Amino acid sequence: MSPNMPKTPPRQIRIGDAWYDFDAAAKAMGTERAAVIRELIDWYIREPGAKLPARPDRQVVDAAREARESRGGTA
């Protein structure tokens, strides 16, 4: 196994354009989407000590959405 090989295979889910806003929100909180999703899953299945991740201010999401829409695309 190479050093950059993840321990788990990627999973695919359909989310829509909110995925891009989620990315901007995660980055604003100094993290990434995958880390937030893992925290949510741990909380949802009641792993001991798991807590809901912190959320950014709504303005972060609104600004990301406006920027994406002004570019006329989804990314």
Image (cartoon, rainbow, N blue to C red):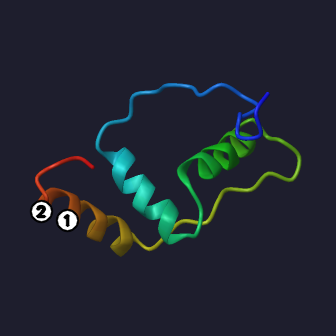
Binning the other alpha carbons within 10 Å of mark 2 as few (below 14), some (14 to 19) or many (20 upward) gives few
The residue nearer to you, when weighing 58 against 6, is 6
Tell me the amino acid under the disc marked 1: Glu
> Residue 22: where, in percent of width, then height?
43, 53
- Circle number at residue 70: 2
User: In the rendered view, does 7 fall on the left or right side of 67?
Assistant: right
Tell me the amino acid under the disc marked 2: Ser
Q: Which residue is mark 1?
A: 66
User: In the rendered view, does 68 fall on the left or right side of 25?
Assistant: left
Query: Residue most toward the front?
Result: 2
**In the image, residue 57 above or below residue 33:** below
Question: What residue is at 59 percent from the left and 46 percent from the top?
Answer: 34
Question: What residue is at 38 percent from the left and 35 percent from the top?
Answer: 15
> Residue 13: where, in percent of width, then height?
46, 27
**In the image, residue 55 above or below residue 52:** below
**In the image, residue 69 above or below residue 8:** below
User: In the rendered view, does 22 fall on the left or right side of 33?
Assistant: left
| Residue 68 location, quadrant | bottom left
User: In the rendered view, does 71 fall on the left or right side of 18?
Assistant: left
> Residue 55: where, in percent of width, then height?
54, 65
The residue nearer to you, when weighing 9 against 14, is 9
The residue nearer to you, when weighing 61 against 7, is 7
Binning the other alpha carbons within 10 Å of mark 1 as few (below 14), some (14 to 19) or many (20 upward) gives few
Tag 2 and tag 1, C-beta contact below 8 Å: yes
Question: What residue is at 70 percent from the left and 40 percent from the top?
Answer: 4
Separation of marks 2 and 1 at Cα, in angstroms: 6 Å
Question: What residue is at 38 percent from the left and 45 percent from the top?
Answer: 19
Mark 2 element type: helix
> Residue 50: where, in percent of width, then height?
79, 51
| Residue 54 location, quadrant | bottom right
Mark 1 element type: helix
From the viewer's perspective, is the residue at label 2 or at label 1 nearer?
2
